[in-house]
Amino acid sequence: SRGEIDTTWRQWRGAAMVGGLMLLGGTGGVAWSEMEIPSNIAAILVATVPLWIALIRWIALRHDRPGRVATAGLLLGFAGTILLVRSTPASDAASQEYGISLIVLMIAPFLWATGSLVSRIVDLPKSPALAISMQMLTGGLFCLMSGLAMGEGSLVHLEAISLKSAAALAYLVTFGSIVGFSSYIWLLKKTDPALASSYAYVNPVVAITLGWVLAGESMNAGSLLAAGVILLAVVLIVRGTARLRQ
């Protein structure tokens, strides 16, 4: 209806907050970091989103204090993150670019988690499709402006784009943005944020497998151990949160 299409400046401001936090800070931070960091390592750190959601809800939003199971998951998750950072090969750790990328990559899940929670409390249109479109539009504009400000416009050469690159971009737009992001935002409105973010269970497994098969990426024993610790932490947090709700 016409009433669902009409928008206010307050709703655009809310959409811009969510789009900026999740798409510029979260997705943009991960994409920028992956110029230096392998996709399998990035996926493991992105899996900390449920940890941040639980922590932000407890400290900033005065939500129920995590129970013993969820608290154990929080502690285990951050221990796994430290273990993952410490398992970085010395040659990579010595690189300033790698270090900066790693810091950005650790901040990105926090910003994504913050945006996830903000999306539940700001004023947005009643139409889910319209609200999500506004978030992606404003977030995309923020990413574009950031890229231009960093001088990345001069790096774009349309004639050099291969069919493989175009297909990859089309896949990300379709399944990463239209399907994935829209489904996630819808779930945030319909269920508990900790449950909605449980997609983090499967991301590292898929990324590690595809990185190994398609990109020739490898992982040392320390990184694999850290991945297991972080995934176990996510399981504990989601289950602990669900138990408290019951």
Image (spheres, rainbow, N blue to C red):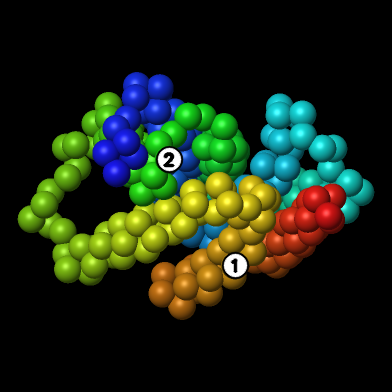
Q: Residue at x 19, y 42 (%)?
A: 155
Q: 242 above or below 22?
A: below
Q: Horizontal placement of 223 versus 111: left or right? A: right
Does dot 1 land on a helix, a strand or a loop?
loop
- Furthest residue in direction right, as rendered: 68
Corner quadrant of residue 9: top left
Q: Where does the image place residue 218, in percent across and percent down from the top left? A: 55, 69
Q: 2 above or below 73?
A: above
- Furthest residue in direction left, as rendered: 159
Q: Are marks 1 and 2 in contact (CB under 8 Å)?
A: no
List the residue tagged with mark 2. 126
> Can residue 221 be seen here?
yes
Quadrant into which the C terminus falls: bottom right
Q: How far apart are labels 1 and 2 at the CA level?
A: 31 Å
Q: Residue at x 73, y 65 (%)?
A: 228
Quadrant into which the N terminus falls: top left
- Furthest residue in direction top, as rendered: 9
Q: Residue at x 41, y 47 (%)?
A: 128
Name the residue type under label 1: Val
Q: Nearer the viewer, residue 230 or 192?
A: 192
Name the residue type under label 2: Lys
Q: Where does the image place residue 159, in percent across and percent down from the top left? A: 8, 55
Q: Residue at x 77, y 29 (%)?
A: 62
Q: Where does the image place residue 97, in percent across and percent down from the top left? A: 46, 39
Nearer the camera: disc 1 or disc 2: 2
List the residue tagged with mark 1. 202
Q: Where does the image place residue 126, in percent across and percent down from the top left? A: 43, 40
